[in-house]
Amino acid sequence: MSEEEMKPLPVLGYSDQKTSNVDLVNENKILEELILRRITQLSMNDDAQFDQRSLSIARTKIQEGFMWMNRAIFQPQRLEKIDYVAVQDLLLSIGAAE
């Protein structure tokens, strides 16, 4: 029996994923949230004066680490083709091109 393939989000560069990969990333998201909540607890602790800058860096690095771990699992790819008309339309819609 082959593992079920999950369709990706409609985000360019992402491909279909095995159910086990989706499960791994979902587990990672839970672990990440638990760690981030711990950092939040430490940053709100009135009894101890913890270095807020260091906690902020810790939060950023944890988020970055989990992002890279999840990218390692999902392995998004660069785009093969770009619709330059769509790019120009996008830039015009956000006011980035004249």
Image (cartoon, rainbow, N blue to C red):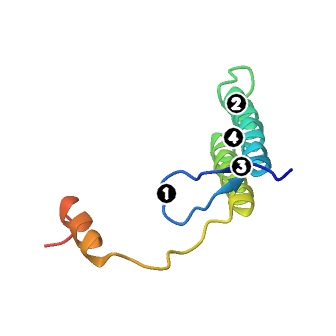
- 44 lies above or below 13: above
Looking at this view, is 31 or 16 the one in front? 16
Q: Tell me which amino acid carries mark 2.
A: Arg
Query: At x 69% / y 55%, what residue is drawn?
Result: 17
Kindly identify which residue carries mark 3. Answer: 62
SS at badge 3: helix
SS at badge 1: loop
Q: Is residue 52 left or right of residue 95?
A: right
| Mark closer to the observer (2, 4) | 2
Q: Is residue 11 left or right of residue 18?
A: left
Counting residues from the start of the chain, the first of labels 3 and 4 encountered is: 4
| Mark closer to the observer (4, 1) | 1
- 97 lies above or below 7: below
Question: Do residues under tags 4 and 1 come within 8 Å of each other at their CB atoms?
Answer: no
| Mark closer to the observer (1, 2) | 1
Q: Which mark is residue 11?
A: 1
Q: Tell me which amino acid carries mark 1.
A: Val
- Mark 3 residue crowding within 10 angstroms, few (<14) / some (14–19) / many (20+): some
Cα distance in 3D space between marks 3 and 4:
17 Å
Question: Do residues under tags 3 and 4 come within 8 Å of each other at their CB atoms?
Answer: no
Q: Tell me which amino acid carries mark 3.
A: Ile
Q: Tell me which amino acid carries mark 4.
A: Asp
| Mark closer to the observer (3, 1) | 1
Counting residues from the start of the chain, the first of labels 1 and 2 encountered is: 1
SS at badge 2: helix
Counting residues from the start of the chain, the first of labels 2 and 3 encountered is: 2
Q: Which quarter of the rendering shows the C terminus?
A: bottom left
- Mark 2 residue crowding within 10 angstroms, few (<14) / some (14–19) / many (20+): few
Cα distance in 3D space between marks 2 and 3:
11 Å
Extreme residue toward the right, this view:
1
Q: Which mark is residue 37?
A: 2
Q: Is residue 18 left or right of residue 83?
A: right
